[in-house]
Amino acid sequence: MNIAVNNRIKELRAAMKLHQIDAFIIPSSDPHQSEYAADHWNARAWISGFTGSAGTVVITATHAGLWTDSRYFIQAEQELADSEIELHRLGVPHTAEHLSWITQHLDTESTVGIDGACFSVGQVRTMAKQFYSKKINIKSDVDLIQKVWKDRPTLPTHTVLELGLEYTGKSRPDKIKEICDTIVKQDATQHLVTTLDDIAWIFNIRSKDVKCNPVSIAYAIIAPQRTILFINPDKISADLKATFQSEQIHIKPYESIHEYLSNLDTSERILIDLATINNQLYNLIPEDCIVKGTTVSTALKACKNKTEIRNIRKAMIKDGVALIKLYRWLDAELDKRGVTEVEVSNQLHQFRKDQGHFFGDSFDAIVGYKGNGAIVHYRPEEATCATLAKDGILLLDSGGQYLEGTTDITRTTALGTPTAEQKRNFTLVLKGHIGIDQLKFPKGTKGSQMDILARQYLWKHGLNYGHGTGHGVGYFLNVHEGPQSISPVTSGKATTPFEVGMFTSNEPGFYKEGEYGIRIENLVLTVEGEQTDYGQFLEFETMTLFPIDQSLIDTSLLTRNEINWINDYHTKVEKILSPHLNAEEQAWMKEQCKVIT
C-alpha cells in the first residue's frame, strides 16, 4: 500500500470537506501554463506519485483518479500501484474525459474546486460549459494543495543569464519594438506576457528555474512607453539591472503583477491571450481594459533568425560528436559487461557536457531497452532500470541545451541480431520519416496535412503510433515549443501553417508493448523552396547529424529514392562530423555511414 499518497489524499479530502468542495482538480501546469513546472507547482506528481509530464488528478470524497494518454499508460500503472488512485486511460473507447466523468458522477449543484492560478481562462470556460447542465459550481479562489502540502518547495531563485547578440541575433529593444508595433495595430496600449519561454526570448535571458527548460519564473508587460519585468530582483545581477534601466525596462517583484493588474487605469487596453493567462490574473483585470488576442512573441520566436540558425548548426555538430562517443563507449562496454539504462543516460550527459557551452539536458533522457522502449516517455531509475546486453533493441531519445541551441534526437539501435519483424517495422517507420523529410509543400500548409505521410506505411500493415509526428523546438529554450506541430489532430498547433525558420522534430515511431520500441527522430528546419506559378513552396532541411542503424533496415522494402536519401544523409553526416573526430571515431562512423544498395 502506498501510504504516503493515500495519506495526502486523506488530508486533501479533509480540506475539501472544510471548504465544502465535492471534487478537486489537480492539473500538471503552473500559473504560466508551462508543460514542465518548477517543483513548487508539481502538485499532481506530489498528490499521486505519477511523474509523467501530462495528466490530471481528480479527488472526490469516494474516488481518486488520474487521467492521462497512451504515452503514459504503462508508466502510470507502475507508479500508481498500491495507491487508491485509479488510472483513467484517455483515448480508449468508453473512457470519459475527466470533466465528463465529474459531470456524470457529481450531484446537481455540487462544487468543484481548482487553484485558479494553474488554469487558463480558456480551460475554466470549457469547464463551466461542461458543468452547466448540472449547475455544478466552480470555486477557483482556494489553493487546497498549499494547505496540505506541508513541505512544499519554495519558488526557485536561480540567477539569470543574459544572452548576447552573437547568440540571439536580435536585441531586446528590437524585439520589444516589433511586439509594440503589433499590439498598437490591435488597438492595445500594452501586452501581458505570461509564458516563460516567451519572456526568456523577449528579454534575451535564460535561467534554471525549471528543470531542462532554461527559463526564469516571471511575468512581463510590454508597452511602447514602458516595459516591466515582474521577477525576483535577486535573480538579476547589478550589471544587468543597469542595462535594463538604460533600455527603459523596469524590474518589479514577481508577486506584484497582481497589484499592477488590479490597479490598471480604465483608459488602458491590455492585450491578453486567453489560452495562456491564468484565471486568477484574468479576474484582476478591469473588464473594459481587456483586448483578446494571442501572445505576439510566440510566432516571432518560432521563426529562427540567421544567427540562431548558424548557431544551431554548431549545436548539432556538438550533439553528433557526443553521441558518437556514447555509442562507441557502449559498444566497448557491452563487450565486457552489462550496462544499465541509467549508466547510458549519465554517460551521454557527460559527453555532451564535454562539448562546451552546455547548459543541461533538454529533457530527461529516454533510455528504453527491449520492453522499456515501448513506454513512450520512459525514464530509467537506478533501482528499477534494465541492464543492456548484446541482444535486443535500444531506443535512446535525448537532447541537450547549449548556448548555441536546443537538440532532440532519437535513435533505435539493434544490440544483437534483429528479427525480421523488427527490421520490417523499423523500415516502415524509416519510410515515414523520409516521407516527412522530403516533403515539398506550398506556403500555408499545416502539420495536420503532413502527418499521414509518416503513418501511411505503418497503416498498410495495420500498425500505428499514439503520439504526434513532430513538435516545434526552441532556440536554447523549451524542447517543445509552439505554435506548430505535425499531428493528425485537426485543431490547435497542428493547424498552424509552417513558416520559413520554424524548427521542428520529425519522429514517427512504433511500439510493441513488453517487447521493443522504435522511433527515428531528426530536427528539421523549414526553408524556402521554389517559386512557381502556383505560389511559394517550402521544404525541410535536416539539421540533426548522426547515423541511422543500418542493421535494422530491410532494403527490400525501400524505393530507390529512399535508398538515395539514406546514402545522401549519411554522406552529409560523415562529411560534417569527421573534422571533429579522432581517427578511431572516424573509422567507426565510416562503418555506420557505409553506402547501401
Image (spheres, rainbow, N blue to C red):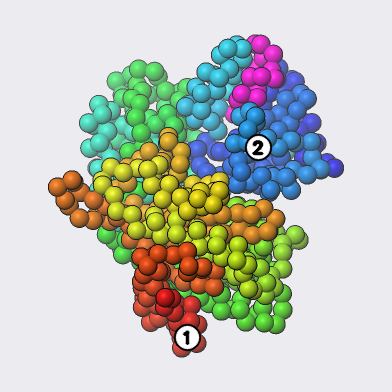
Q: Which amino acid does label 1 sit on?
A: Ala
For the residues labelled 2 and 1, the Cα–Cα distance comes to 47 Å
434 or 33: which is nearer to us? 434
Assign a secondary structure to mark 2: strand
Q: Determine which residue is flagged by label 2.
A: 89
Residue density around tag 1, few if under 14, some if 14–19, many if 20 or more, within 10 Å: few
Magenta span of residues: 99-115
Report whether 518 appears left or right of 242: right
- Lower position in the chain sequence, tag 2 or tag 1: 2
Q: Determine which residue is flagged by label 1.
A: 587
| Quadrant position of residue 424 | bottom right
Please indicate, yes or no, whether residue 455 appears anywhere in the rendered image.
yes
451 or 486: which is nearer to us? 451
| Quadrant position of residue 65 | top right
Residue 202 against residue 562 in the figure, above or below: above
> Which residue is at 55% across, 69% downward?
552
